[in-house]
Image: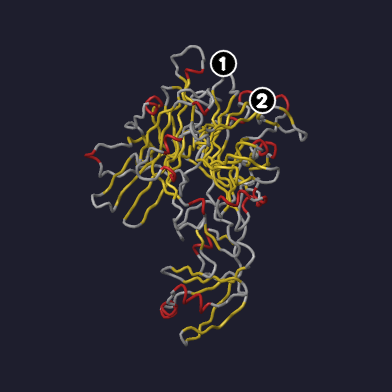
Amino acid sequence: LSQSNIPCDNAMVKAGGVYLGAFEVSHLSVWESDTCLALFALSGDHDLTKLLIDERVNLRNFIDKNLPVTASTLNSNMSHALTDAEAHSLCVQLSLKSTEVMKVDDVKYQFNWNSKVSTTLQVDKAFKSTPLPDLDATFSPRRVGWLGGDVAASIPLPNERNISLPPEKMLWLFGDSIIGVSSPTRRIIDHSKSISNTVGVSFLSDTTPTLNNSNQRNSIREIRSMQYFWRTHREEGYAESIFSRIESSSPDCPTERTAFWPFSGIPVHFEQKQQQRKDHVKLLIVGQLVCRDPLANMEITALRFYELSVVFVVVSNPYDPPDSWDYTFTAIPALFVAGSGDGSNAQRVNISALSSSSSEVKDRLFMTDKEYLYMLGLHSTSTNSNTTTNQVILRAKVNQLLNFDFNDIQILSNFGDKMDWNGLLLSSSNRQMLLQPFVMFSPSVSEATLHFDSYQDRWVVVFLYALSPTMQLCRSANNNIASTWNCTNMAMVDPKWCRMELLFIYAGRAHPGLMIPSSISKQTTSKSNSNHSDLQMVVSFIPNTLNGDIELYEEDFFNVYTPKFLLISETSSIEN
């Protein structure tokens, strides 16, 4: 706990809770280490005798060894966040509220009650976030059809008329989705069905920036229309997932409990074709195949699943309606495993997201088949009973991935004081060799976006930690993805979407395809407003219920479980 590197040290879930990251350290509970003992209780509930008995804390060992013992009284109607500094020094008296004497095992002990616990989060002042309610409304539940879904990964398709023009059509990948009927105020459960994935298709407005009433650059492309797609069972007529064949491919989980969640994708254009035509583009998608486990010991119902494998999908006709897509796929349980023969020191690498753009050509949101595709990966190291997972960067040639050839995937690694690309799949004779990957940030996340921002001329990763109320931003120092990276909290989510004991948020993503291309935006900005922002981007997140899908059919949760959007702006006066 004291070694947590979570950038966002808050998770407002339960009233009266104390959290470090997403880890609960309170209610009537104890934090015990080799150097101190910290006790937590809610105000008006100082029954530490019960606390000590329930938690089986040997208080006398701490007293006899002259180790610090402190207790904190916390407001019972709110959550509290511990900063990293407080996590490392919980035994330091910050302020004394009162002194109490209690009796345990016929021995009287005196406790100093500390009520000063941080409840605030630091967001980088260089960033301003603006809600986008009109964009939110585009994804509101329909009266008939699509009623909500998570993930919400966006993929701009290359312009069919001219590949050099900005995209006109954008795909949206959704995970678990609700299909059915709604009234103006709620989803109707008797006429609805949940499926594991759907796809949306939107048509975008033109690419001319406008000025809003405050004389600020408006670089967001509007969605002119939105359609949702799923498959229909040929015989029974009920709704099925777009990628239903993937869900019936695993021998390790019953089909009815298997789900495929697409996380990111990138169009691939074949360079040898001189004229842009839709049959010259394929779509590469990466996602997660999971098995739902309703009996899992997870308090949050939505988290009751376990991963089966990462799945790569190639769609050969992405311009056609998604319910008629032709696709092939392959599942990869792990890309690399190394370690000692007894498994006491093992490593595992897997892929969590594809880059949505390339630094090869400015403003281009697709790849060519000869280029390297950059990916976010999860690198896990297990030592005895301890496992750590870090976010890492991978790359591979696009044409090899389209052929499901993973033999030449490389991982960005540390070589002394330098970084370079290292072959990931080592030969069997080198399996004992352990990787030293470059760690972008830790702990890792399974949902994030990676893209090249032409306006800033550097790489960008956007994500949030599930249960956390802040959007995270990581950026490379320059246009080389192998440069150093810096991360910060860039936006606070509206508290109404993470109400304690009701909702949590996840699936933080950026949507570069919704922004006016930088080449156009800069030209217009230079004529109209010189004080433009260094960075502007649209990001989204998903609010969901803590207590299961059944709540999504109640009136209070009608607008939950659809993507919510923010415009993030960075002021030019701040040194990056």
Residue for badge 1: 162
Crowd band around label 1 with a 10 angstrom C-alpha radius: few (<14), some (14–19), many (20+): few
Asked if one can make out residue 573 in the rendered structure from this viewpoint, the answer is no
Up the image or down, 401 lies above or below 346; here it is above
Residue type of the residue flagged with mark 1 = Asn
Residue for badge 2: 205
Residue type of the residue flagged with mark 2 = Ser
**Are dots 1 and 2 in contact, CB under 8 Å?**
no
Up the image or down, 195 lies above or below 74; here it is above
In the rendered image, the residue lying farthest to the top is 274
Quarter holding the C terminus is top right
The circle on residue 525 is: none
- Snapshot quadrant of residue 428: top left
Place of residue 77 in the rendered image (x, y in percent of width and height, measured from the top left): 64, 65
Q: How many marks?
A: 2
**Residue nearest the viewer, comparing 128 with 387:** 387
In the rendered image, the residue lying farthest to the right is 213
State the colouring used for the structure image.
secondary structure
Place of residue 466 in the rendered image (x, y in percent of width and height, measured from the top left): 53, 50
Relative placement, left or right, of 123 versus 346 is right
Crowd band around label 2 with a 10 angstrom C-alpha radius: few (<14), some (14–19), many (20+): some
Place of residue 85 in the rendered image (x, y in percent of width and height, measured from the top left): 53, 60
Place of residue 171 in the rendered image (x, y in percent of width and height, measured from the top left): 55, 30
User: Which mark sits nearer the N-terminus, 1 or 2?
Assistant: 1
